[in-house]
Image (tube, grey):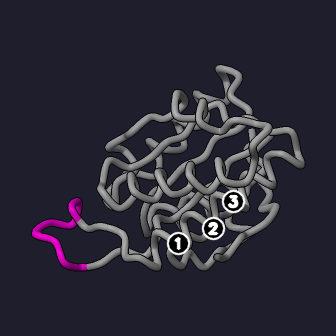
Amino acid sequence: MRIWVMRHGEASFNAKTDNQRTLTEHGQKTAFKQGQWLAKRFSDQQVSLDKILVSPYQRTQQTLEQVLAGMQAVSSVQSFANVARAVESWDGITPGGHLDNVLNYLDFLRSEGAKNVLLISHLPLVYNLTQALTHFQHSVHFYPAVIAEIDWQTDNGKLIVAEFP
């Protein structure tokens, strides 16, 4: 399984609750740019996503919207609009999400035949997940909108690339 672990774009702090925080203009632009990068990468590798896991928090939902828009802007031949059917909004990947639950769910998806998964979440989960998937062999500085691509064919995953916007 190939997993793209992404932290949400830069978010403002002007909200009543943490889950209502929205992306800044810069956060929107970098998420869009990362979507363009993903589209080129997927096209070059002939990848289609089996599942997109996204936190229900507003900033991650907005990040996904911008990523999909960026993907769509890159390719007029391949439609990334259909990717939306693979989206699952999951409370398990909010900032307080439990790493073991995420690992178990990813393992389940892998056992069901999923080959390519995009996960958009928060710190510290994205950092901890990357560490766990690679058995602490790789560390990624998850600034906003950073994406880590991990090859997780076996339980000892390998960091392929970390893309900074």
Q: Amino acid at mark 2?
A: Lys
Tell which circle, 3 or 1, labels the residue nearer the N-terminal end. 1
- First to last magenta residue range: 13-20
What is the C-alpha distance between the residues marked 2 and 3?
A: 5 Å
| 60 with respect to 30 (left or right) | left
In the rendered view of the protein, which quadrant contains the N terminus?
A: top right
Please tell me in which quadrant of the rendered image residue 17 appears.
bottom left
* Circles 1 and 2: CB atoms closer than 8 Å: yes
CA neighbours of label 1 inside 10 A, class few (<14), some (14 to 19), many (20+): many
Q: Amino acid at mark 3?
A: Gln
Element assignment for label 1: helix
Q: Residue at x 77, y 62 (%)?
A: 159
* Residue 95 is one of the magenta-drawn residues: no
Residue lying farthest to the left in this orientation? 16
Q: Amino acid at mark 1?
A: Lys
CA neighbours of label 3 inside 10 A, class few (<14), some (14 to 19), many (20+): many
Residue 29, label in figure:
1
What is the C-alpha distance between the residues marked 1 and 2?
A: 6 Å
Q: Main secondary structure of the magenta part?
A: loop
Q: Residue at x 69, y 59 (%)?
A: 36
* Circles 3 and 1: CB atoms closer than 8 Å: no
Give the answer, above or below, for where 100 lies relative to 8: above
Would you name the residue on which mark 2 appears? 33
CA neighbours of label 2 inside 10 A, class few (<14), some (14 to 19), many (20+): many
Residue 21: give x, y in percent of width and height.
25, 67
| 110 with respect to 81 (left or right) | right
* Circles 2 and 3: CB atoms closer than 8 Å: yes
| 160 with respect to 18 (left or right) | right
Would you name the residue on which mark 3 appears? 36
Residue 58: give x, y in percent of width and height.
30, 56
Q: How many marks?
A: 3
Q: Residue at x 63, y 58 (%)?
A: 35
